[in-house]
């Protein structure tokens, strides 16, 4: 069974678009859970693609191709992930997006899907989301959690802008702020005053549930 993960990983790193899709379909046919495909094959492959880019062996076009293949695999897996949706009545409301200046959305979309599968009502604002838009939407839908993603060291500070804006408006306590993305750490979350951090989509759901409980107790 582990061979299929290796095959998927290799074909994504080598940018064999059709082969990746075909192998993911094959894995799903074998009842392999989508989260295992993501964690054991697709995500490690994307990190490798990023490393090759950093070394100058791959260019932007290669990043784009790999990202498109990953996204198409997500389209195949999303219905399976959502089939496991926990409850009919939402356990909380989340506004999620990738921060201003940042166009990376694969990880954010996985987190959004997993939160939805975990029973949250999710409003996905997409990428390059300005601080004002996060706050506006959170107020509009009466959100419990504002969740932000950043993949660039240059954009991660835009997360703080959202927290500062909440403080400025006197509504910081109304929402829990959850952050994540490859360059984000627990320390960074503390530093900017976020309420929670998670390194992957599964942990994001656990932390989100904890944050909603805390909010209800306030
Ligand atoms: C694919 C990719 C792209 C694609 C994105 C396509 C898309 N639709 O997303 C494209 C080609 C557009 C791109 C562009 C650029 N990229 Co890019 N990209 C990547 C790459 C290879 C993979 C990212 C990815 O999708 N990973 C897979 C997902 C599943 O993982 P993830 O995003 O980390 O998400 C997981 C966790 O972090 C967490 N998580 C994520 N979000 C959230 C949110 C919350 C709330 C929580 C709790 C958790 C959480 O859960 C997720 C699931 O487990 C990374 C390499 C890397 N190591 O990350 C570089 C990388 C991020 N890119 C990089 C760079 C430099 C760029 C560009 C500046 C390149 C350029 N010269 O133009 C541009 C910037 C464009 C912009 N303004 O955003 C650098 C960043 C370096 C840095 N220190 O900032 C990296 C690290 C590559 C490298 N090693 O050099 N990129």
Image (cartoon, grey):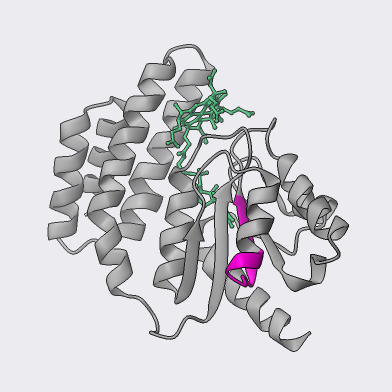
Can residue 29 be found in the magenta stretch? no
Q: Which residues are magenta?
A: 139-148
Q: How many marks?
A: 0
Residue 168 in view of the camera: yes
- Answer above or below: position of 210 versus 12: below
Residue 179 in view of the camera: no
- Answer above or below: position of 127 versus 177: above
Left of 103 or right of it: where is 215?
Answer: right
Query: Looking at the image, which residue is at 43% across and 68% down?
Result: 116
Can residue 142 be found in the magenta stretch? yes
Quadrant location, the N terminus: bottom left
- Answer above or below: position of 93 versus 55: below
Q: Identify which residue, 117 or 166, lies in the foreground.
A: 166
Q: Identify which residue, 57 or 172, lies in the foreground.
A: 172
Left of 49 or right of it: where is 170?
Answer: right
Left of 188 or right of it: where is 104?
Answer: left
- Answer above or below: position of 129 versus 168: above
**Residue 173: x, y in percent?**
80, 71
């Amino acid at each position: 069974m582990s061979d299929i993960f290796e095959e998927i990983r290799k074909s994504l790193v080598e940018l064999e678009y059709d082969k990746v899709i075909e192998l993911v379909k094959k894995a799903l046919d074998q009842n392999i859970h989508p989260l295992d495909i993501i964690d054991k094959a697709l995500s490690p492959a994307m990190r490798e693609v990023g490393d090759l880019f950093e070394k100058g062996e791959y260019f932007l076009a290669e990043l784009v191709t790999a990202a498109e293949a990953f996204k198409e695999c997500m389209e195949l897996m999303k219905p399976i992930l959502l089939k496991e949706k926990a409850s009919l009545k939402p356990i909380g409301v989340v506004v999620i997006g990738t921060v201003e200046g940042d166009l990376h959305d694969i990880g954010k979309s996985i987190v959004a899907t997993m939160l939805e599968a975990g029973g949250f009502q999710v409003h996905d604002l997409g990428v390059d989301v300005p601080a004002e838009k996060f706050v506006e939407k959170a107020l509009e839908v009466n959100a419990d959690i504002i969740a932000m993603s950043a993949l660039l060291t240059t954009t991660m500070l835009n997360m703080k802008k959202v927290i500062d804006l909440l403080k400025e408006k006197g509504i910081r306590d109304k929402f829990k702020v959850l952050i994540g993305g490859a360059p984000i750490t627990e320390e960074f979350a503390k530093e900017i005053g976020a309420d929670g951090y998670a390194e992957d989509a599964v942990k994001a759901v656990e932390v989100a549930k904890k944050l909603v409980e805390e909010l209800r107790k306030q």
